[in-house]
Amino acid sequence: MAASARSSSSTTDDAYSGAPPGELPYRNAFDWCFSQPFLAESDFCPAERLLPPIEASRPIFIDNKSGECHYHCPLRASPLHVCMHAAAAAAAAAAADSRWTDRALTHGQISKDALAIASGLVGLGLDPLKTQKLPPTATCRQGAELAPVVLVQLPNGLPIAPILLGVWAAGLTATLVSPALTSDEIAWILQNSRPQAIITSSACLSAMRGALAKQGDQAYFSTVPLFAVDPADQYPLNPTNNSSSSPPQQPPAPGTRDWKTLLASRLRRRVHIPDEAAAYRTAVVLWSSGTSGRSKGVLLSHHALNFSVGALWHDADFHKPGAIERFLGYVPFYHVFGLCNVFLLGICTGATVYTMPAFSLDAMLEAIPRRSITHLHMAPPIAVMLAKAPNVEPYARRDASGRNAFSTVVAAVTGGAPLGHEVVVEVFRRCGFRVRLGYGLSETCSTSLQRGITEAEMHDHAGDTGRPHWGIELSISDGAGGTAQLDQEGEILIRGPSLMSAYLPIGLHEGNTDMSVTTEALTSDGWFRTGDVGTLNRHGRLRITDRLKELIKVRAYQVAPAELEAILCSSEHVADAGVVGIYDESEATEWPRAFVVPRKVGRSRAELEALAQQLKELVEKRTTKYKWLVGGIVFVDQIPKSPSGKILRRVLKNGGPETRGVEVSLYKSRRKSKL
């Protein structure tokens, strides 16, 4: 079996890479974050990654818009020139107004406020000792344990740090939800996670209330406390003394409480959970789209998160000894990429993370030189912008010394979707740093990464996604129960301590502990079946060549075709539908494209265009933006299917007689500076 890649029958030609994990202590994720884990040399911290102590006063999260200088320089000869004038203007503004300052959360403040929130949550009656136990799985022999769930739905910003860490300090489980979801999508998550408290952005209250209204058990959900976070609020309330004890600035919306009331507790105590429980106690539930069309709850233990952070830092060859890393925090923290690579890594290493609630190319370009950013995290479309967008040019232009606005950036990392090597090369030529490809999933955290930051290493790694991180194993299945050979295609398998414990069983709170979805995803000896197809070469580098799964990768998000097909077929004007992803090379992403069979035959072009607009509005009403049919609609006579009735998506993707029809574009060019 491929899962037994290192068995006695293995050969050196087996497609296997990595090594079994070394030692990393079991700790609650809150304790791990504030234990300063990289002070001493260890299995996960080589000597070249050692860090000095993180002082309590060190800023960790800074609101990137705070302290922003709006000085307009008429001479835009270079961004360095602009930044020099901006710095002078900033100094003048600071001298004239002592309130003009960055709004920051320090290492000590995060810990203090997280402990207050922990006490506040326990004070609501959330009991961390009242847990639900799942049956054992191949990655969690003890059986995953769920504490009372706190749903957190927030954009990147300062409040999410004490809130999420406060949930963990209380011994509770967090479920992280995108602020972009519709009420239908949130309703599914509420139904399955059954949170005992909800903390959401004020901008999401309408969708959240709609989702709550859809719940069948109103006797339960009407009692769940709903806390609102207003992005306009100033937190910390007084940056000068970092006090968070002042009263709320605005009254909360009816039926909600201001989240800062959770800070009122004077106890500031964490709930003690045995360290060994970190292996099976669920820290966070993330939501990953499944081929069934509904998102699946991915259970990640405290140890899985901690191990992922340890592995990331072990392999952080971009780090210069003595430097304090400076990240831009626009990759969503509710996504596994942003959660592990930016949010948790920033706290554990004492890095400074400049938070942005959403990506904007112009804001990123302005922030990189002003904030002296050292390492960038990005979805592939951002790399395409850096390679091609005209507004990058002034920042890429070099001065007499050869420096430009990107000169502080040592490297960048991308993942979640394919990215052509020619784009990587162009970013290096234009901006001066290497964008390195990585591979990971919600179910596995970060799995592999290209090593090195030089131009020669960039070309040497063309087309691959690097070697496995420390403590992670990769294998390629031959599809017949064995291990493929080197350079032979097969399904990619992943094993390591950062893997999920299980998927959340649908209907768990009604007593359903059906683990069949988890069992299908894992081999008996703990390998995760990714559904992706790839090869491993003799250097242990992974190359992804295809996907067994039908999921569409829109930027770093996953879209289930079955979900969109169900929505389209709910229209009385649609007889059948099939959805596939089409790749847009200019944006380095896939877009959903629908093939639709109209119920009424013989429609004119004008009638089909009108129907397309109706279907466009239907999808927009019922899904979040990245699921929209940007790839357009093609009206066809029939959807190609197998004898068993399964849609032949490969036929739809590759073209043929079945895909010929009337094509209607629904959106104008996607070339924008915002994602």
Image (cartoon, rainbow, N blue to C red):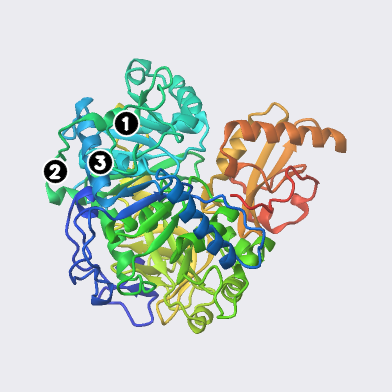
Q: Label 2: which residue? A: 273
Disc 2 marks a residue whose amino acid type is Ile
Q: Residue at x 68, y 52 (%)?
A: 652
Depth check, front residue: 318 or 559: 318
Q: From mark 2 to mark 3, how far is it between C-alphas?
A: 16 Å
Q: Which quadrant, please, contains the N terminus?
A: bottom left
SS type, badge 1: helix
SS type, badge 2: loop
Mark 1, residues whose alpha carbon is within 10 Å: few (<14), some, or many (≥20)? many
| Mark 2 or mark 3: whose residue is earlier in sequence | 3
Q: Is residue 609 left or right of residue 40?
A: right
Depth check, front residue: 232 or 141: 232
Can you say whether 39 is above or below 298 in the image?
A: below
Task: Give the number of the mark in front: 2 or 3.
Answer: 3
Q: In this view, does 540 lie to the left or right of 379?
A: left
Q: In this view, does 216 lie to the left or right of 120?
A: right
SS type, badge 3: helix
Disc 3 marks a residue whose amino acid type is Ala
Can you say whether 459 is above or below 572 in the image?
A: below
| Mark 2 or mark 1: whose residue is earlier in sequence | 1
Occupied quadrant, residue 113? top left
Task: Give the number of the mark in front: 2 or 1.
Answer: 1
| Mark 3 or mark 1: whose residue is earlier in sequence | 3
User: Can you see residue 196?
Assistant: no
Q: Label 3: which residue? A: 114
Q: From mark 2 to mark 1, how far is it between C-alphas?
A: 25 Å
Q: From mark 3 to mark 1, how far is it between C-alphas?
A: 11 Å
Q: Label 1: which residue? A: 260
Q: Residue at x 35, y 36 (%)?
A: 237
The single residue placed furthest to the top in the displayed view is: 219
